[in-house]
Image (tube, helix red, strand yellow):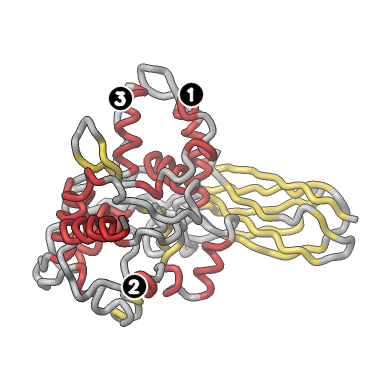
Amino acid sequence: MKLVDAMVVAALTTAACPAGAADIPPAERRSGYSFMAPDSQAMQNDDTTNPGMLWVLDGEKLWNSKAGAAGKSCADCHQDARASMKGVAARYPAFDTTLARPVNLEQRINLCRVRQQQATPLAHEGRDLLALTALIARQSRGMPIETGADPQLAPFVGKGRDLYMQRQGQLNLACTNCHDDNWDKRLAGAAVTQGHPNGYPLYRLEWQSLGSLQRRLRACLTGIRAQPYEYGAPELVELELYLMSRARGMAIEAPAVRP
Amino acid sequence: MASALINVPAKARRGEIIEIKTLMSHIMETGYRHTADGAVVPRDIITNFSCRYNGKEIFRAELFPASSANPFIAFFTTATESGKFEFEWTGDKGFAATASAAITVE
């Protein structure tokens, strides 16, 4: 039985992640938190100094306000977010059977708005969508990331990994060149880090705002002088999916603070 | 009303020095930035913050365009009696927000 299990795991691993010598061993994975200065860590540790909590407060108001032609609020179906949304963010991006592809948390919220509330989708990176995402992600704080467990996601994790390994842009860099091979070094004054998305949506001091993982990925793509994908593009969702499955088991910190 | 986070100890001994921390949701647009087509983005900042302890003003601050978004203001005071702290932020475009927190002094 054990051998069969091991073989299945090996088969899945090979299918989803072609052998890469550069992978960071699970025991050596580090949250971006551990690269931060003590001041920034203290800011994240205290919910009354973490500016991300302002979006969580806004999210609570939105959660309880009715929207769309159906005249329903999130709370009308999902009741108290603190109970119903516990652990949800730790499983996203997740497979949507209607679309037959993975959707991230922001897309799930917008699908819920369109399908259930019969409302218009919220704009990417808009205050309202970030606020609802932050509220939901907050309920998974401290829980281990489980994304990618669904076998239907395997081909998409594979695509995300391919993109992660793909050199691109005028600088001809792949994500792996920095975040697997050089995460312990610095790029100008900033730590390179391992690129684990365990705190999104998070408050970046540089942005002076909360932002999504896709905003971060687009900024990285611009940094290597590649053409960034549009918000919600399937490629970005697959990359999110791979990054989350790569960070499987790490604790969610949302809404985190990062420099 | 904009969201605010207030941290005031719920209890304190009489005469104890306590720290009060406030975080206010605001974009703090400096007025020095331009859009892609050259138009100035108008200034939109919080200009004044004050704190009253049982009606008496104990702290006041003026804010200027160099402050970060979502300004965090922390200060110390002496806990003298049980009661209420009232916070007020005012700023450009008619911005006004208030918050309060109670304290028990033993």
Q: Quadrant of the N terminus of chain B?
A: top right
Amino acid type, label 1 = Asp
> To which residue does mark 1 refer?
A76
Q: CA distance from mark 1 to mark 3?
A: 14 Å
Residue positioned most to the front: A1
Which tag, 2 or 3, sits closer to the chain's start? 3
**Dot 1: chain letter:** A
Dot 2 crowding, Cα within 10 Å, few <14, some 14–19, many 20+: many
Q: Residue visible at 71% across and 53% down? A: B51
Q: Would you say B25 lies left or right of A248 here?
A: right
Residue A76 place in picture, x, y as percent: 48, 24
Which tag, 1 or 3, sits closer to the chain's start? 1
Q: Tell me whether marks 2 and 3 sit on the same chain.
A: yes
Residue B103 or residue B65, whichever sits in front: B103
Amino acid type, label 2 = Thr
Q: Residue visible at 23% across and 46% down? A: A153
